[in-house]
Image (tube, helix red, strand yellow):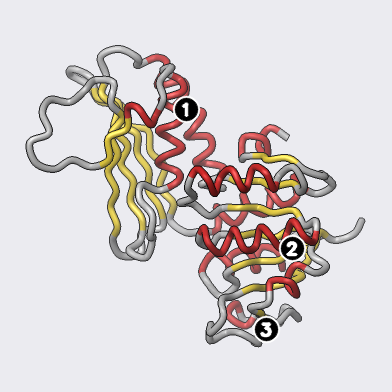
Amino acid sequence: MNNLKIAVCGASGKMGRALIGIIRDGEALELSGALEVPGNPYLGKDAGALLGFEAGVSISSDIATIIDGADVLIDFTRPDGTLRHLEACVSHKTAMVIGTTGFSDQEKAAIKQAAETIPIMMAPNMSVGVNVLLRLLKTAAQALDEGYDIEIVEAHHKHKVDAPSGTALRMGEVIAESLGRNLSDCAVYGREGNTGERDQKAIGFSAVRAGDIVGEHTAIFAGTGERIEIAHKASDRSNFAVGAIRAAKFLSGKSGGLFDMEDVLNS
């Protein structure tokens, strides 16, 4: 069986390094390319240098070179960069795993259109644990429909640029869908001043940005005399990387389609 050739965006970052390490240790996996932004100090260096081994792949800023020969590109960057990489993937018929968050509705539509040509797995969180959390939220929301106020609290490192996180928004979507609501109609993002009494049908969001927090998400269902909290806390990025590699394997052999982690876990 041929190795699955994987190209990694953001190769010198924490997620990129985690992915490269898993690819090195994985069975039938091969690092075929490593991408970084122009001006990155690691351009031209071996992609395994930061992990203490020689990968035999130099970090480049040329997406066309990175895509050439790759079966799948894994992208955890920012929306503008991801969309540029998406164009290259479409041109080269390369599958794509997208873990980037913060897309506008128009950008999401562009990704959906690209999925008519190439297979794409897009999820705000690749962690298996987080996706189990989403399943639990469906059950909780349906059981706690009446008399419970719902709040979602998330915390991330100080360098994260979008808020609420994509995972928090997905949690809100799952809860809203389970309750027959539209999240855009009931979401409340932060509170300040005289806000008046809480609308019981609201789903509130609060975001913390501090230090090096990898990612923490908690859904609170608060009733009279009791409170149920369903939470996931990540202590490092390896769980996200493991999920992304699992997604890359899932896309192997597919000709097109837009998938999420639910599809991957059910395969």
> Could you give the CA–CA distance between mark 2 and mark 3, rounded to whole angstroms?
16 Å
Can you name the residue that lies furthest to the left here?
194
Q: Quadrant of residue 73 in the image? A: bottom right
| Residue occupying image coordinates x 46% and y 20% | 178
Kindly state the secondary structure of the residue where label 1 is placed: helix
Query: Mark 1 belongs to which amino acid?
Result: Leu
Percent across and percent down for residue 232 are 42, 42
Residue 6 is tagged as 2
Query: Mark 3 belongs to which amino acid?
Result: Asp
Front: mark 2 or 1: 2
Q: Residues within 10 Å of mark 3 (few under 14, many from 20)?
A: some
Q: Is residue 14 left or right of residue 115?
A: left
Q: Nearer the viewer, residue 231 or 85?
A: 85
Are circles 3 and 1 on residues that touch, CB within 8 Å? no
Q: Quadrant of the N terminus?
A: bottom right
| Residue occupying image coordinates x 47% and y 34% | 133
Vertical order, 229 against 15 (above or below): above
Q: Nearer the viewer, residue 232 or 158?
A: 158
Vertical order, 207 against 18 (above or below): above
Q: Is residue 25 visible?
A: no
Q: Earlier in the sequence, mark 2 or mark 1?
A: 2
> Could you give the CA–CA distance between mark 3 and mark 1, rounded to whole angstroms?
42 Å
Which residue is the site of mark 3? 46
Query: Mark 2 belongs to which amino acid?
Result: Ile
